[in-house]
Amino acid sequence: MKKIVLTFGLIAGAVMAAFMFATLPFMNSLDEHSLIVGYAGIVAGFLLVFFGVRSYRDNVLHGAIGFGRAFTTGLLIATIGSVCYVLAWEVMYYKFMPDFYSKYAQSMVEQARKAGKSETEIAKTRASLEEMTKNADNPVWVFGTTFLEPFPVGLITALVSAGALRRKRGSRDPVLATA
């Protein structure tokens, strides 16, 4: 299981990191383009969870896997992929975009103004974003908050994959049965 989990987890992380680095041209605009590319990369990367669980079931367990083992395998792949995503962000943030959080804070305050928020609401937004910017000086905080970005998607993918791929020993593959 270790080899499959590592292989598919690292490939998932590489896919997500590649999509993340593809957002570098959009780094100054902080618009929906970088969000779309970023989340498309997360979804594309976590497709490897499904393929990893299937590979483990078919190649190691000879076609049978329970929900628990499938979920554990998918969760490990998602965790490794998420850690790779975070490491890529740490490199991108500290090497290419060290002012990201302050620019993001300014952008959010401007959006609040354009949305017609009251000065009290804008002040609250500004205060919370200043706190976030201050926290961003701590790499552990950046790691934790960045991990929470892709991991829920990986968790859901692991659950869906485990449900879709579970198969008892001796049961026939419905795809092969129709061929």
Image: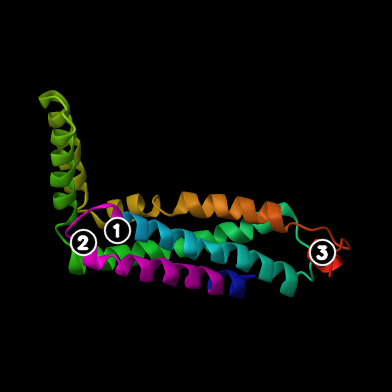
Residue shown at the point (21%, 51%) measured from the top left: 136
Residue shown at the point (84%, 65%) measured from the top left: 178
Q: In the displayed image of the protein, which residue is found farthest to the left?
A: 119
Amino acid bearing label 3: Asp
**Residue 177, horizontal then vertical, whole percent:** 86, 66
Is residue 10 magenta-colored? yes
Residue corresponding to mark 2: 27
- How crowded is the residue under tag 2: few (<14 C-alpha within 10 Å), some, or many (20+)? some
Q: Is residue 92 something that shows in the picture?
A: yes
Q: Which secondary structure class fits the magenta region best?
A: helix
Residue corresponding to mark 1: 34
Amino acid bearing label 2: Met
Amino acid bearing label 1: Ser
* Figure coloring: rainbow
Which mark, residue 173? 3
For label 2, the SS is loop
For label 1, the SS is helix
- How crowded is the residue under tag 3: few (<14 C-alpha within 10 Å), some, or many (20+)? few
Q: What is the C-alpha distance between the residues marked 1 and 2?
A: 7 Å
Q: Earlier in the sequence, mark 1 or mark 2?
A: 2
Evaluate if marks 1 and 3 touch, with contact meaning CB atoms under 8 Å apart: no
Q: In the displayed image of the protein, which residue is found farthest to the right?
A: 170
Highlighted range, magenta: 7-32
Relative horizontal placement of residue 147, taking residue 159 as reference (left or right):
left
Q: Earlier in the sequence, mark 3 or mark 2?
A: 2
